[in-house]
Image (cartoon, grey):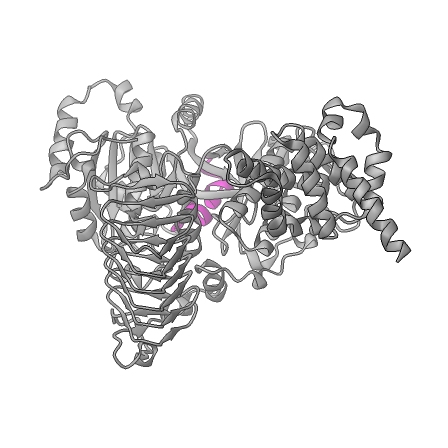
Amino acid sequence: MGPKKGGQAGGNKTKVGKQTAQQNAAPEETDQEERLQAIVLSDSYQTRFQPLTLETPRCLLPLCNTPLLEYTFEFLALAGVSEVIVVCCAHADQIQEYIANSRWSNFSSPFTIETVLSPESVSVGDAMRDLDAKGLITSDFLLVSGDIVCNVPFDKVLTDHRQRRAKDKNAIMTMVLREASPFHRTRARAESAIFVLDEQTNQCVHYEEIKTRKHMKQISLDPEIFNKHTDLAIRNDFIDCHIDICSPDVPALFTENFDYNHIRKDFVHGILTSDLLGKTIFAHIVTDNYAARVRSLQTYDAVSKDVISRWTYPITPDSNLLADQTFQYQRGHIYKEDGIVLARSCRINSCTVVGAGTAVDDGTVITGSVIGRRCKIGKNVSIRSAYIWDDVTIEDDAIIESAIIANGAVIGASSHVAPGAIVSYNVKIDSNIIVDGNKRLTKYLGEENKNVDTDAVGEDGDGYVYEDASEAEEDDDYEEIVNSSGLVYNMASLNASDTSFSTVSADQPHRKSRRRRISTASNNTVASEDSDEDSFLREAQASVERAVAENHDLDIAALELSTLRMAKNAQFHEVRAATIAALIGRISHLINSNTLKARAAVESVLNRWGPLFRRQVFDQADQIDFLLLIQRDCTRRMQGSSILLHAINCLYDQDILDEEAILKWWYQDPQRKEDADMVKVGELVPRWLQWLTTAEEESDSE
């Protein structure tokens, strides 16, 4: 987890640390090969976080009250990097000052660190060409952006890469890809890609970038690929964080090809389609750990929620990555620093972070939000799914939903900041003002702004509407990117359907296997024999558990399950099994923790989440299968008999189960009778069936 947290260093410790490393460096070539350098691109070369990044580099924007660059450095320390080179473009002075005063410049740091100025770079390609010209790359290096959050153990990734390099010097890159459903929340909505991999070696033989709204239905592959690779997997279920292990050849290839600007759509695509270079690129697929990149406002929101919910453990707020942080974890994913002042009647609900020196007045409710340091929050304020940075003042009766409020901003009394809005540094919003969703307000006025509107902040306000005309003019897909990369994603624009995402045509029956491969022995696409149902069940169960823990909208939870089912070509039986495991697990937790009694726990969970089953259970056969799954799950739960009884009653009241299906399950299905555990867990059901029969008879007599 990096160096121990001591006092912050003053002065330029970078140079001293580097000299010490050089003095102690061993001369042997083998040691040189074992060293791992890291290149950190501090600039994203995009404008998606503007106007915030007009004043602060993206890598220093706070994520859960910690600069993004800290998460990147923490990952590099875990990965065993020995030398870090930070490439600075915009706001280089701020980045240099931050690093010089950070713990990473101390002698106790696990790596030496150096900043390299590249002020004329406007793309990753420019930065790589600049590094090549300076001759700074001396060994295999890890190429990352300064906005990643990752807890992947890197030993195996690095070992596999070096073994491939030892056998074949043309193996120049290993891409680290995280397996996830096509609409997992940490995937950048506006961008997606198809990777064609050799199933035996994970060599990437084709890469193609796609836009999610264009509904690509086919890709073109060079026939020569099929002569060289017998088993291919076409994958669109990766989160690509742009974490790459590269050989020293990579910067030189950028220099030789001046049209390479982007690492994926230019460099990777160009290498794989070149007949002359003969270079190869591989993928390392991560299934059990976390990796994500904060590349848009949408992923900023998603990754923040994952950090708070501890999916990134041990990189969590209470690990206190900064020397002066004092976060402590409380039940319900609540994190509080020392020195906060909370009024007796305010409520800090689940999934919330509150920084030191913040004061919250009476009647205020904060849910699923991050509050920075030294904030002053007035009476009867409502903050939900918002990101409030340092030194913000929010006056009485204000409402803030799914918005970012930057340092020093003031939100006037009874104002409403709607979902998707950004209020940048030191902007002042007058009282009784409504800030429309997806509007961006700033005090920074540059040449980019053509339209200003002081009415947006009120007569006593201070700020302007920001519009990034340059990107709108240059990018044909600007509207798509804006709609799908904001804090609030417009699901209506997705136009998702079973047909548009399924790998099976509408007139084909669903197949049990979900991953598909191409074989040169046949023109047909055949099901892979090694499909893994457990992979789908784990991911689907985790999706539902996450939705319950963070109180997602029911429609969003259902959509994620649906897209995951279609991406994996799963059957509804498996979807039901995963949903039941998640919800019954939640019920069991509430009971075992003495939070609620069995009946109250069942009703609390199923009254809220039971309607999910309406999209999974369609006929009587489905209902019987559904009941068997619930019964089987209850056999492994404490108080399983009570859970089963109350679950049947609750789902019957919701008309998800009908009387005829329940009676057939109980009296006719052999699976229920042949298993001793199933029989035992159903011991309370006859009492309920007796009530059901009696109630039906009384109804008939009336």
| Image spot of residue 174 (x, y percent) | 43, 34
Magenta stretch bounds: 260-279
Q: Is 421 on the left-hand or right-hand side of 221?
A: left
Q: Quadrant of residue 100?
A: top left
Tell me, yes or no, if residue 625 can be seen here: yes
Q: Quadrant of the C terminus?
A: bottom right
- Is there any visible trace of residue 208 in the rendered image? no
Task: Find out whether residue 139 is within the magenta segment.
Answer: no
Instruction: Give 227 or 649, whichever is nearer the viewer.
Output: 649
Please state the horizontal and vertical placement of residue 526, each as a whole percent of the image.
72, 36
Q: Residue at x 57, y 63 (%)?
A: 493
Residue at x 80%, y 50% (from the top left corner): 507
Looking at this rendering, what residue extends furthest in the left direction? 11
Instruction: Return the x and y of residue 674 as percentages of the image width and height.
Output: 80, 24
Where does the image place residue 203, in percent across and percent down from the top left? Answer: 52, 32
| Residue drawn at x 40%, y 50% as measured from the top left | 262
For this view, does 67 lie left or right of residue 618? left
Q: Is residue 360 above or below residue 12?
A: below
Q: Which of the image's four quarters has the N terminus? A: top left
Q: Which of 354 and 640 lies nearest the eye of the viewer?
A: 640
Judge by depth and name the residue closer to the eye, 255 or 229.
229
- The front one of 50 and 6 is 6
Is residue 277 inside the magenta stretch? yes
Q: Is residue 171 above or below residue 71?
A: above
Instruction: Say if 598 sits above or below 457 in the image.
Output: above
